[in-house]
Amino acid sequence: MPIDQLTAEALALPDNLKIQLVEELLASLETVDEAIQAEWIAEAQRRRDEILAGTVQTIPGDEALAQARSLLNQ
């Protein structure tokens, strides 16, 4: 089946089935590298510990996004 025909059929699906299809397609692409996952977990724990210890100052999410957008627009 050509990709354009497959795409047309997928787009004709009801939203709930589109979501299910997307989730299944994404899951089929995900390969978990255990070493990388362990590094991300360690980083998240380190950052959590810094926040709990008060060694870093947090900022509200909307302010962080505004700063990121400002940097991207420079």
Image (cartoon, rainbow, N blue to C red):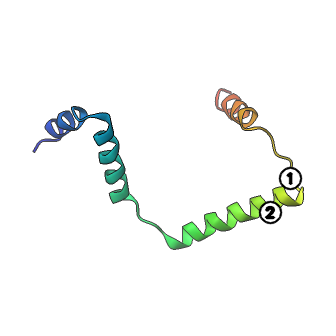
Residue at the right extreme? 54
First-in-chain label (1 vs 2): 2
The 10 Å Cα crowd at callout 2, few under 14, some 14 to 19, many 20 or more, is few
Q: Is residue 70 left or right of residue 27?
A: right
Quadrant showing the C terminus: top right
Q: Whole-percent x and y of residue 65?
A: 68, 34
- Residue bearing the label numbered 1: 56
Residue type at mark 2 is: Asp
Q: Residue 49: which disc?
A: 2
Q: Residue furthest left?
A: 1
Q: Is residue 33 left or right of residue 47?
A: left
- The quarter of the rendered structure image containing the N terminus is top left
Name the residue located 75 percent from the left edge and 64 percent from the top edge: 46
Q: Any mark on residue 69, and which?
A: none
The residue depicted at 72 percent of the width and 64 percent of the height is: 45
Q: Is residue 74 left or right of residue 6?
A: right
Q: Where 55 falls versus 70 (above or below)? A: below
Up-down relation of residue 36 to residue 65 (above or below): below
The answer to whether 73 appears left or right of 9 in the picture is right
